[in-house]
Image (cartoon, helix red, strand yellow):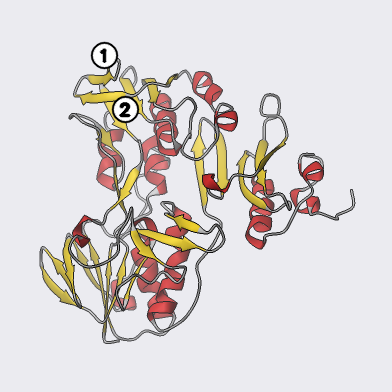
Amino acid sequence: MERVVVVGAGLAGLRTVTALREQGYSGELILVGAERHPPYDRPPLSKAILLGTADDSALPLDPASLKVDLRLGTRATGLRDGVVETDDGDLAYDGLVIATGSEPIRLPGEGAHYLRTRDDAFALRSVLRPGATVVIVGAGWIGAEVATAAARHGARVTVVEQAATPVAHALPSEVGQRLAPWYAEAGIDLLCGQRVGVVRPDGVELAGGTTLRADVVVVGVGVRPATGWLDGSGLEVDRGVLVGADLRTSLPGVLAVGDAAARWSPRYSTRIRGEHWDDALRAPVVAAANALGGAETYDPVPYVWSEQFGHMVQYAGIPAAGGNLVWRGDPDTDSGWAAFWLAPDGRILSLLVVDQPRDFVQGRRLAEAGTPVDPELLRDPAISVKASVAGSAR
């Protein structure tokens, strides 16, 4: 290949160009990014940057050493055979990697803050002040982190969630309800089972007609893959660019990684959209290898972590995996605890771990390896997770 174009200059895009060079690609390399900021890490936006403990999350990048043509402030607008169309002209390619990420789902109305970019984070941080009334729509991972930051800034915070419990997109109610008390302990009002109909500059209107007044409204109800620029391209797109476990798309020479991709998972026999930092970090290495003619497979157990209300929350797996629920520790009395979902043969399908990073590391490794565990050993916090492997002695 003489020219590879990578569209999307976030972590996934940067990791792709780095991996291409590390794996021996010596041709022309162009990295296109819609934002004017150089590549940066997104997790700190809702954590350290919003809290005010950091002002930067830039990723290491030396365009000269990578021999990459960095096109910042350039938006991809279309794709046709062998050409990426941008608002700064056409870019022909021999190989293409799509890493355009995702965009926040927006609610009807105006005046809300959405947290996706560096500029979004600083704009929101500037209005989180003592005494401000803040309404946050959504009690998922991001909503909880924004609520944590707003409360620490001294704001009066209300979180509105359509589902009956927090993090309902990933956790069943019997587990999600264990996170609900954290809101009250942080001085935050949590209103579950309430749908926001309209966002207004001075608050939100609930579907039932009640208005919640607010100085600041933040919406965090999920994201959609940023794939609108691919309309009419012939590329197969369905809630993300459809790719196989090899990250190849339906078009020759085109691959997709990160939030923009909907990859087939042989592990779970379903399509998965990563939407998290770990996916943007790991998938590009496989995409680069396959762009250069390899035949590697990317099929990990998905992983996400969240820092909220003084707790480290780590989750691996997919909600649709199901399984038998096994509690490790008591959420009502223990400072750290976990929930594991096991297949009938004892394999770990997914796991949620609170304030027990060692348990999570060991559990994730067993889940990745497909190693069966003994439920009775697993539920005992006095026994290490790795020692709960089926057949292990107590």
**Can residue 74 be seen in this snapshot?**
no
**Closer to us: mark 1 or mark 2?**
1
x and y percentages locating residue 333 in the rendered image = 70, 25
Dot 1: element: loop
Tell me the tag on residue 128.
2
Name the residue nearer the viewer: 302 or 272.
272
The image quadrant that residue 367 belongs to is bottom right
Image mark count: 2
Query: Taking 379 as reference, is 213 above or below it?
Result: above
Point 24% across, 20% down: residue: 203
Q: In the drawing, does residue 85 fall left or right of residue 274?
A: left
Residue 191: x percent and y percent? 42, 19
SS under mark 2: loop
Toward which corner of the image does residue 312 lie, by quadrant? top right
Q: Position of residue 277 (x, y in %)?
A: 44, 54
Q: Which residue is mark 1?
A: 209
Q: Is residue 137 above or below residue 57?
A: above
Amino acid type at image mark 1: Gly
CA gap, disc 1 and disc 2: 27 Å
